[in-house]
Amino acid sequence: MDTKHMEYFKAVYEERSIHAAAKKLFISPQGLGRILKSLEEEFDAAFFVRGKGGVIPTEAGRIFYGQCAKTGDELARMKKQIRRAAEKPERLHVGFANGVLQLFPIGTLFGFIRENPDMQVEWCEYENDVLIQKLCEAELDYGLVVGRQPDAGLLQSLMCTCPVVLLVYEGHPLYGEEAISLPMLKNEKLIVMNEQFRIYHDFIAACQVEGFTPQIIAKTMDGGTLRWMCMQKQGLAVTPDFPRQQYPAARTIPFLGNYSWDIFGSCLPKAKENGAVYRLEAYFRSAGSGPAESAEIKGNDT
């Protein structure tokens, strides 16, 4: 079976018309009809019931359509991987979830690039869910993702974990607390990173488990803005305890419970065969002392 014929079949299925699909595919209705007939003969099943108003898929046609969609996705992913493998010089496409470069400074990546002058490295930051999608679709070779993704089909290795804390400005009633439980925030004005960050969704979900919806007065995609608003006494800030951050007139207080920002090196199983991916992850680990006091670099956890 010519894989292109699956696309022809899908067009007829979606248009519910051989003539409309033929026009879309720039082939003749007669030629398209012959392709459909050959597919039906090959699978010994009728895929459509033909009538004056167009064509109606049979149960066999609906099954074939579902398989065509899956096969098409797999073929597209395979083509991307093959095209990537054939690129010269060797290329490495890397993605970072928003905020991750606070823990893996961009200088670490630049150090890897300097030590591998024959490799072309392209990188970009993405919203966490977008990054996961691009990894799954083989648009990226490797990514530093926030959180474990058990259903994404990715190989993941815990690279770093950073505690999530509450930033409290001096003079607030909670300023002297040694630890914070989520119910203590029920009536507090809160500042958080916005929906592009995994921490936002995790925090909302954790509060709802405790029976309340947090009173969020501001959302930002800039950690500096979040900390500045807190120190201006606009509200309390929920933030990863990024290393090397200074908090004048404010202090970080840990949460009771296991709340952390976990960073996973992630790739498709096939990408792990790419020597460049292996070298990059090893380099990140060897430079792991960089993220410093509050961030803990982990050993292998693939």
Image (cartoon, rainbow, N blue to C red):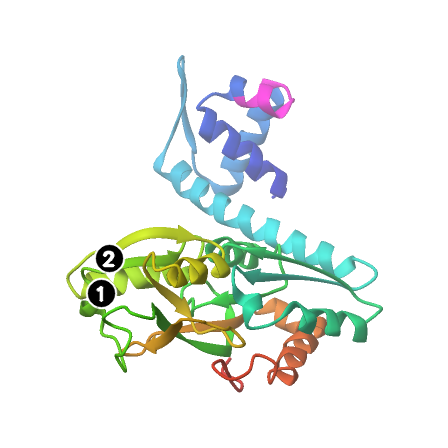
Q: Secondary structure at mark 2?
A: loop
Q: Which residues are magenta?
A: 21-29
Give the labeled residue for mark 2: 214
Image location (x, y in percent) of residue 41: 52, 37
Pointer 2: residues within 10 angstroms few (<14), some, or many (20+)?
A: many
- Residue with the most extreme top position: 52
Q: Is residue 263 above or below residue 295?
A: above
Nearest the eye: 48 or 140:
140
On the question of residue 263 being in view, the answer is: yes
Q: How many numbered tags mark residues here?
A: 2
Give the labeled residue for mark 1: 185
Q: Amino acid at mark 1?
A: Leu
C-beta proximity under 8 Å, tags 2 and 1: yes
Please state if 32 lies on the left or on the right of 127 as rendered. right
Please state if 237 lies on the left or on the right of 243 as rendered. left
Residue under the image location 39 percent in, 52 percent down: 219
Q: For residue 168, what is the image quadrant?
A: bottom left
On the question of residue 266 being in view, the answer is: no
Q: Earlier in the sequence, mark 2 or mark 1?
A: 1
Q: Is residue 145 above or below residue 253?
A: above
Residue under the image location 25 percent in, 79 percent down: 177
Q: Is residue 137 magenta?
A: no
Image location (x, y in percent) of residue 218: 36, 51
Please state if 58 lies on the left or on the right of 84 as rendered. left
